[in-house]
Amino acid sequence: MGTPALANEPLAVGTSVRIRTLMPPGHVRAPVYLRGKTGTIERAIAPFKNPEQLAYGLPAKEHMLYRVRFRAGDVWDKNAENPDDMIEAEIYAHWIEKMDQSHAA
Amino acid sequence: MDTQTDGRRWHDMGGQDAGPICDAQHDFSFWEKRVDALMVLCSGKGYFTVDGLRRVLEDMGEEAFETMSYYERWIASINQNLIESGAYTTEELAAQMAEVKARGATYGDASLGK
């Protein structure tokens, strides 16, 4: 398991992370197929206002947006045609948890 | 509404079986381009963002996705967001729609008539 990253805590390139497995019913930006999957931080892009608040016309706090890199085999398991292909997705900090050292690759 | 047992919503389709991808190209009609331009204007004026557009599209549900065209869904969502953000009231919208309808039956009449 991992520890939820804080919105104001920078994650270094290469950090092992897991996308949180939350399943709220509203407008969210982290795709279900990546939730619970592990990858690494490819880069920190920039802070953006949280789209999950903007979607309802509300004032929004800024969250860091990261590009996270996943191995296709880690995302699709046996269904991956090319398990070593990479998938990169842009994920907000509040959907990311850091992997504990004992689980990090 | 949502029928997935794992809690995912209907629009979150990544990784699900979907059959072959349709890669047919088509031109957009004039009204569709206008809807697209309207979205640019609305976000530029600060009425709402693309996030609000997406939120309503998602809340419209899978039936709307199956039965309405892309820009039909967009204009429904834009209208919903404009009402929510106070750009106009439903009463004002109703009066304007009646006025446009009275200009004539064809798209050209309704667009250009005065």
Image (cartoon, coloured by chain):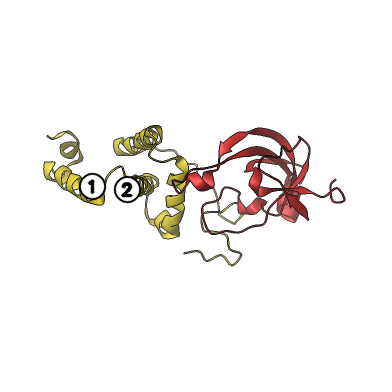
Chain colours: A red, B yellow
Q: Which residue is mark 2?
A: B83
Per the rendering, the mark at residue B93 is 1
Per the rendering, the mark at residue A41 is none
Please name the residue shown 66% across and 38% down the image: A66
Amino acid type shown at disc 1 = Leu
- Residue B20 visible somewhere in the drawing: yes
Percent position of residue A31, x then y: 60, 50
Q: CA distance from mark 2 to mark 1?
A: 9 Å
Amino acid type shown at disc 2 = Ile
Dot 2 lies on which element? helix
Percent position of residue A100, x then y: 82, 50
Dot 1 lies on which element? helix
Percent position of residue B64, x then y: 40, 56
Please name the residue shown 63% across and 43% down the image: A92
Pick whichever, A96 or B4, lies toward us.
A96
The total number of labels drawn is 2
